[in-house]
Image (tube, rainbow, N blue to C red):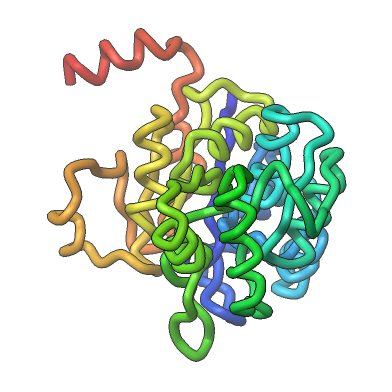
Amino acid sequence: MAGGVLLDMDGVIYHGSELIDGASELIHELLDREIPFRFLTNNSQRNRRDIATKLQRFGLPIEEKHVYTCAMATARFLARQKPGGTAFVIGEGGLMTALHHNGFSIVDKDPDYVVVGEGRMLSFEQLETALRMILAGARLIATNMDPNCPTERGLRPGCGATVAMLEAASGMKAFSVGKPSPVMLSDACRDLGLPLEQVVMVGDTMATDILGAVQLGLRSILVLTGSTRIEDLTQFAYKPDVVVDSIAKIDLELLENLWDVEADGLTRELQAGVA
Ligand SMILES: [Mg+2]
């Protein structure tokens, strides 16, 4: 009996336009064995079809259902908080589509929420409008708090940087849905149709992928092909269950050791305590 896998993308399966060795083999193995998995991204710019297409261009036979974005998590969260609500959006297509898909309307006046995602079109005018809306009572929602994002030319400011500006100006604190929030990770597990004990998170970033897994009680594997070097681990008070050089070192045997298909959550905690 098998569990499932949540995979971060950037730094785990690719760098920019280059696929990381071993990614294709693992994905094919998961597909062949019908092991459920989702690619998780904190980038809200693109929708799941765009991301599936990007992965298909790497030669991976990925479908839309394999992709779960923080834009989707944010839209589902808001639909639960306020069905049929309204949002002023600082962000792009992926976020707008997800909000529409979940029954939200995008408005320029009196929104229930100001929702901030990734994008390259940010203007001071948008920030000014958003600030006034927040001061008038709109709630500030972040798709994620990543301070920056890797690109092929280096880092660019991330959603978290934009949100920080609005927080400073308004004195209000945003609620963030993307990794490491348990809102996004538990939603992704629900999407897999598996209990938390049977899901392994694979990521390259301690503060999002691994922290989220630790907080939710998911087993985790850190790969060293992205933002974390082995010596960085001393800076964190939590750690992943397993550290590997790259995705090439992840096989079914390793995953099977981490999936707890027998025990319930409490039993596993007790076992961990004894170990
Ligand atoms: Mg990453």
Above-or-below relation of 167 to 229: above
Closest to the observer: 82 or 155?
Answer: 82
Pinpoint residue 215: horizontal percent, then vertical percent.
Answer: 37, 33
Left or right: 162 with respect to 206? right
User: Looking at the image, which residue is at 79% across and 50% down?
Assistant: 98
Closest to the observer: 251 or 141?
Answer: 141
User: Looking at the image, which residue is at 17% across and 43% down?
Assistant: 237
Image quarter (top left, top right, bottom left or bottom right) of the C terminus: top left
Residue found at the far left of this picture:
234
Residue 257 appears in view: no
Q: Which image quadrant for residue 216?
A: top left
Pinpoint residue 234: horizontal percent, then vertical percent.
Answer: 13, 55
Q: Which image quadrant for residue 191?
A: top right
User: Looking at the image, which residue is at 36% across and 68% down?
Assistant: 227
Closest to the observer: 75 or 124?
Answer: 124
Residue 266 appears in view: yes
Closest to the observer: 16 or 85?
Answer: 85
Pinpoint residue 134: horizontal percent, then vertical percent.
Answer: 58, 51
Left or right: 126 with respect to 218? right
Pinpoint residue 101: horizontal percent, then vertical percent.
Answer: 86, 45
Above-or-below relation of 184 to 145: above
